[in-house]
Amino acid sequence: MLQHWVFSLHFFTFFMLLLMLLSGMLHIALGLHGAVARGAAHAWSDAGVSVVVLLMCGGYLGLAARTTYGESFWKVALKTAGLVVLLYPSLVLYRLFLFFVVHWLT
């Protein structure tokens, strides 16, 4: 049980650090090009960041699960695909939560 808890703690630490890093890099890149005010560019970049985050998290999750639990490649790949599919709604809900927190606090 403790092994699962430590694994999930490490995974979500990676997930949050990745979100912060990519969001910061995207904000700097769009800010330098003056594209922050354009809604279409922001919507495209938002979808792109979501896909990149999911792919990177899937890769990290697969490698970490295989190393931690020592299961076969196909078993880990199937579990990882299922968890990444479940991670997307979590990502959307997390960002919605952050939106409302920022909205209510400002």
Image (spheres, rainbow, N blue to C red):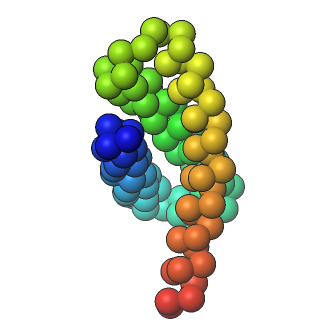
In the rendered image, residue 67, in percent from the top left (x then y), is placed at 31, 20
Q: Image point 58% across, 44% down: which residue?
A: 87
User: From this viewpoint, is residue 97 visible?
Assistant: yes
Direction front: furthest residue: 1
54 w.r.t. 17: above or below = above
Quarter of the image where one finds residue 31: bottom left
Quarter of the image where one finds residue 81: top right
78 vs 1, nearest the viewer: 1
What is the total number of numbered labels drawn onto the structure image?
0
Q: Indicate left or right for 75 with 64 as reference.
A: right
30 vs 64, nearest the viewer: 64
Quarter of the image where one finds residue 83: top right
Q: Image point 57% across, 84% down: which residue?
A: 103
User: From this viewpoint, is residue 11 visible?
Assistant: no
48 vs 18, nearest the viewer: 18
**Quarter of the image where the N terminus is located:** top left
68 w.r.t. 39: above or below = above
In the rendered image, residue 66, in percent from the top left (x then y), is placed at 38, 19
Q: Image point 58% across, 70% down: which residue?
A: 97
Q: Image point 45% across, 9% down: which residue?
A: 72
In the rendered image, residue 98, in percent from the top left (x then y), is placed at 53, 71
